[in-house]
């Protein structure tokens, strides 16, 4: 399995972030792991992307339901950002939502991958090998 340069976790739940960081680190699949507690914080992390392409993560694991700025708000803002290389970023929604309308909105936003929480070793390996070569 290829190593990913950078992964960004966007989730407001501390326990989920802790478990996901533990899983990602145990699999040694990335050189850099960034965490944001909501869409607004994630956008702040990405603001410097125009001048520093290395800040653009290869993979974003995005929760839908968060305070401040939810996953859908993040997706809209990310699409509007002027960031060279962002088209190469894979965004995977990671959610507990079983609402078909959420899945439909995610697909309309151009997201290819919708995973149910919790993230597992198998789902992460499958995601990386299937979509990231």
Image (cartoon, rainbow, N blue to C red):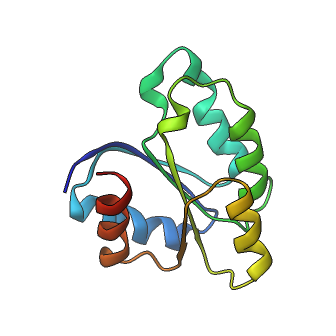
In percent of width and height, residue 131 lies at: 38, 56
In percent of width and height, residue 93 lies at: 58, 64
Residue at screen point 41% across, 67% down: 20
Vertical relation: 100 (above or below) 57: below
Do we see residue 1 in this rendering?
yes
Residue at screen point 70% across, 63% down: 106
Residue most extreme to the top: 51
- Quarter where residue 45 is shown: top right
In percent of width and height, residue 41 lies at: 67, 43
Vertical relation: 117 (above or below) 132: below
Residue at screen point 62% across, 81% down: 96
Vertical relation: 93 (above or below) 3: below
In percent of width and height, residue 47 lies at: 64, 27
- Quarter where residue 129 is shown: bottom left
Q: Nearer the viewer, residue 24 or 4?
A: 4
Q: Which image quarter holds the N terminus? A: bottom left
Judge left or right: residue 23 versus residue 80: left
Do we see residue 70 in this rendering?
no
* Number of numbered discs visible in the structure rendering: 0
Residue most extreme to the bottom: 98
């Amino acid at each position: 399995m290829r190593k990913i340069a950078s992964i960004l976790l966007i989730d407001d739940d501390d326990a989920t972030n802790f478990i996901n960081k533990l899983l990602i680190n145990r699999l040694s699949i990335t050189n850099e792991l960034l965490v944001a507690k909501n869409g607004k914080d994630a956008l702040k992390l990405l603001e410097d992307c125009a001048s520093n392409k290395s800040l653009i993560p290869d993979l974003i694991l995005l929760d839908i339901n968060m305070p401040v700025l939810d996953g859908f708000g993040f997706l809209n803002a990310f699409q509007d950002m002027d960031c060279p290389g962002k088209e190469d970023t894979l965004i995977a929604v990671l959610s507990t939502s079983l609402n078909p309308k959420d899945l439909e909105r995610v697909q309309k936003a151009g997201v290819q991958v919708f995973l149910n929480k919790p993230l597992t070793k198998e789902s992460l390996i499958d995601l990386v090998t299937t979509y990231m070569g």
